Amino acid sequence: MVFLNLSSVFEQKSVNEQVITVISGTNRSGNLSILVSRAVVELLTAQGIETKLLDLQTLPEDFAFKNEVYSNSSAKLKRIIPSYIGKADRFVFVIPEYNGSFPGVCKAFIDAVKPDRFRSKKACIVGISSGRAGNLRGADHLTGILNYLNVAVFPKHVNITHVDGQVDESGRINSASTQELLERSLKSFVDF
């Protein structure tokens, strides 16, 4: 009979020992996702949490065909995946609404990473849109994918509506209520 040592399975790092990767979920230039992602990094860093920002604009152009899953990753992707995905305990996905969902580049990136790198980690989803729904559908689609990968998704998605009117020229969130929502939600996510 084989007995498992479950104590190591259920050990959790303290909040300050955790590493959170914030993923700016689009590769379009001039996007607002990167600005919201930077605000998230700032808020998490202020809580004393080691936080990294992965901007999907920096992915190699051929990542969808040269990656871990196909066992032929480019040198750049070989540096990105272990550092931003492998070493992370949690993720915050900042996803804009594209065609009623989230950007295909974000799904393609998830598909380029071996599933066990995501398994048993946690994620928070921040949906943004220029409309009034804050990418509700896209957040639901991404939740289904992450659940399939055995990622525990924080149940209270952050949905930022009319995002183009909530970011100023310097790239800072200028809405007190949105800033407060992000702060409160991220604090809850860290405790999740």
Image: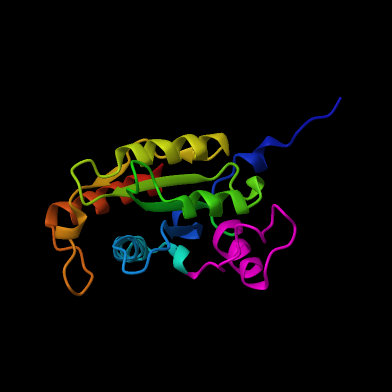
Question: Residue 96: percent from the left, percent from the top?
Answer: 33, 52
Single out the residue that lies furthest toward the bottom.
Answer: 170
Q: Quadrant of the image for the N terminus?
A: top right
65 or 26: nearer the viewer: 65
Residue 56: say if magenta.
no
Residue that appears at 66% across and 59% down: 67
Single out the residue that lies furthest toward the right.
Answer: 1
Question: Residue 38: percent from the left, percent from the top?
Answer: 33, 66
Question: Residue 128: percent from the left, percent from the top?
Answer: 28, 50
103 or 95: nearer the viewer: 103
The image quarter containing residue 35 is bottom left
Residue 119 in view: yes
* 51 with respect to 86 (left or right): left
* 141 with respect to 60 (left or right): left
Single out the residue that lies furthest toward the top.
Answer: 1
- In the image, residue 48 sits, relative to residue 157, either above or below, namely below
Residue that appears at 79% across and 30% down: 3
The image quarter containing residue 156 is top left
98 or 50: nearer the viewer: 98
Question: Residue 118: percent from the left, percent from the top?
Answer: 58, 47
- In the image, residue 77 sits, relative to residue 190, either above or below, namely below
Residue 53 in view: no
Residue that appears at 65% across and 58% down: 65
Q: Quadrant of the image for the C terminus?
A: top left
Count up the numbered dots: 0
Residue that appears at 34% across and 65% down: 34
Span highlighted in magenta in the image? 58-86
181 or 15: nearer the viewer: 181
